[in-house]
Image (spheres, rainbow, N blue to C red):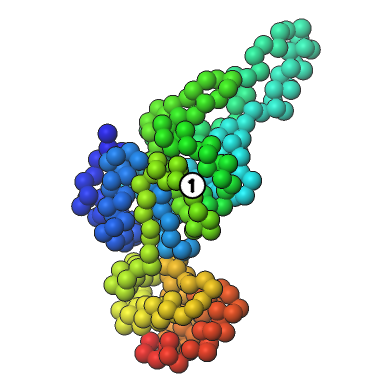
Amino acid sequence: MAACPLDERALASALEREGYFADEGLRTAVHLALRLGRPLLLEGEPGVGKTEVASVLSRVVGRELIRLQCFEGLDAGQALYEWDYPKQLLWVRVAESRGQEVGDLYREEFLLRRPLFRALEADRGAVLLIDEIDRADSEFEAFLLEFLGDFQITVPELGTIGARTPPIVVLTSNRTRELHDALKRRCLYHWIAFPEVDRERAILRAAVPGLEERAAEGLVRAVQRVRGLPLLKRPGIAESVEWARGATALAEGGSPWPVALRRALGLLIKDEEDTRLVAGHAEELFRDV
């Protein structure tokens, strides 16, 4: 059953209304993931809009966004559930002081629900973002397989718990390490590339009110050239938007547009070596902005 009643064209329009300008490949991937009820695995360099897909989808389909930020050492307790030991201990002491039986300490009132558990329990379903899965350990990937395959988890004290309404799951990866095939098989995969010129210009127009058309064209040309340099970290869409906002603020304060772009370069480039490299190619990069 489809997780979203919108057809492919209506979904594309809804994404654009939310300010997300996806190319045909990404629109197709999102549409199929929703129609087939499959987790969507998005890879790409930082700043190309992977995380924003989940945020926009939650608004489009009217579901709660639940985020699990991955990191090295993340375990099942932090992602799924934990028992509230202080509350359990307090209950034991109260029961003993009243001369009552302690009873079962592993019942739902003592359960601390973490993101995966909350996504399963959401009555209307949720959009679950598992962000930067490549930062987690491979053992955590193995733990996710049951969840991604059947939208259920097993709690030893409570048994198997399935989703009330299957969540829409979006996983992102910056590809700092290779993900296991078993995880990929459970997902629909898409690589998000840097946007082409026209799409990036449309993104800037939507994200930076007051940005003139000629200024947007020049800025996008400069960003495309910067990405062509052998940088340690190529700037993503998020950086180009912030660069446009910063340069616009300086231009409104009286700086000529090319000067404003150079002064705001720290919003685009975030590494010392990259900054020196861009400075060495400044005439080429900013010749017609």
Q: Residue at x 76, y 7 (%)?
A: 99
Q: Quadrant of residue 91?
A: top right
State the residue at coordinates (51%, 76%).
Answer: 231
Q: Nearer the viewer, residue 23 or 178?
A: 178
Q: Indicate left or right for 135 with 213 as reference.
A: right
In the rendered image, residue 138, in percent from the top left (x then y), is placed at 56, 45
The N terminus: image quadrant: top left
Q: Is residue 43 above or below residue 5?
A: below
Give the residue at mark 1. 180
Q: Nearer the viewer, residue 34 or 268?
A: 34
Give the amino acid type for the residue marked by disc 1 in the picture: His
**Screen quadrant of the C terminus:** bottom left
Could you classify mark 1 by the number of other residues whose Cα lies within 10 Å: few (under 14), some (14-19), or many (20 or more)?
few
Q: Identify the residue shown where x is 35% and y is 41%.
A: 38
- Which residue in the rendered view is the most extreme toward the front? 181
Is 181 located above or below residue 282 in the figure? Answer: above
Q: Is residue 151 left or right of residue 4?
A: right
Please state which of residues 197 and 185 is positioned toward the viewer in this rendering: 185
In the rendered image, is residue 58 in sight?
no
Question: At numbered mark 1, what does the secondary structure look like: helix, strand or loop?
Answer: loop
| Residue 179, placed above or below residue 220 | above
Q: Quadrant of residue 203?
A: bottom left
Q: Position of residue 175 (x, y in %)?
A: 49, 58
